[in-house]
Amino acid sequence: MIRVTILGTAGASPTKQRNLTSVALAYDGDVVLFDCGEGTQMQILKYGVNSSRIRAIFISHAHGDHVIGLAGLVRTLALNGRKEPLKVFAPRGSEGVVRNLIEFDKAALTYPIEIKGVQKGLIYEGKDFTVSAFKLDHTISSYGYVFKINNKRRFMGDKAKRLGIYGEMFSILQKRGSIRLGKRTIRLTDVTTISLGKKVVYASDTRPTSSTANAARGADMLIHESTYADAESGLARDRGHSTAYEAAMIAKKAKAKKLELIHFSARYKSASGLETEARKVFPNSVAAKDGDVIDL
Ligand SMILES: [Zn+2]
Ligand SMILES: [Zn+2]
């Protein structure tokens, strides 16, 4: 099970209800963060994310509302006595911004931090999952991320039994890919199916772009920025953002199962109007709220 905790849903500046952007994913004892806006460490405490389990932080781009929270979080982890290394990913060319936030006051950190420049493709392999990056379309270099649990091969018990496979034959089949039974050859593919691992895609900040639709193909959840309502579509275009309608069009194109809208302009006291606009195109759309927890 993947647990998605929405830590912050504000774009550019916070409101009383919304902290700046960050999303935590927990899976099988590991936690990763997507973006780390100012105040993320408070949200982590408030919404019960286990910060000692954070293995990696993926920064979409070096705008302050997505990255400033790193400064406080890395220091608190040190005060908690962390020893385990932390990886921080940010678009290639913006590693210096991340380094400054980590090193500006020469704070004594108790653990190594590895800063990695991101380009598109596979960038991180966990125990049983991967994270890959894809290009977004914003005013500066910005990347979206795909969190994907590895596909698993499963034996079809009944069929294997019918064909006379039992006991240690399963492990031989798995190792060699086939097994001879009398005159017959049974292949691994004859008695197994592939179950597809779940996929969560994070895209903020960005204009609607086909690279997101491609990355989010069949995703269990697409988390997409939705800074503006339709009435402000001109602003969205000028400032490299998306409207709720545009985010919903991407979810529809990708045939995603669920759309979570985040990164709302402070001009909207409630994001429910944006949710309504998105649902006209993609019914399974939700305007995320800080503290929302979704299990997939
Ligand atoms: Zn932003
Ligand atoms: Zn931005």
Image (cartoon, rainbow, N blue to C red):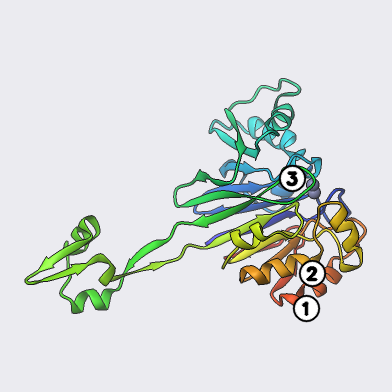
Residue, x 77% and y 66% (percent of image)?
246
Q: Secondary structure at mark 2?
A: helix
The quadrant in which residue 226 appears is: bottom right
Residue, x 83% and y 58% (percent of image)?
227
Badge 2 amino acid: Tyr
Q: Earlier in the sequence, mark 3 or mark 1?
A: 3
Badge 3 amino acid: Thr
Residue 159, position as x, y percentages in the image: 25, 77
129 over 159 or under it: above or below: above
Residue 232, position as x, y percentages in the image: 91, 63
Q: How far apart are labels 3 and 2 at the CA level?
A: 27 Å
Total numbered badges shown on the rendered structure: 3
Q: Nearer the viewer, residue 204 or 167?
A: 204
Badge 1 amino acid: Lys
Q: Are marks 1 and 2 in contact (CB under 8 Å)?
A: yes
In the displayed structure, does residue 106 sit left or right of residue 201?
Answer: right
Q: How far apart are labels 1 and 2 at the CA level?
A: 8 Å
116 over 41 or under it: above or below: above
Residue, x 60% and y 26% (percent of image)?
110
- On residue 280, the disc is 1
Q: Which residue is mark 2?
A: 245
Q: Earlier in the sequence, mark 1 or mark 2?
A: 2
Q: Secondary structure at mark 1?
A: helix
In the displayed structure, does residue 94 sit left or right of residue 295?
Answer: right
The quadrant in which residue 66 appears is: top right
- On residue 40, the disc is 3
Identity of the residue furthest to the left in this view: 182
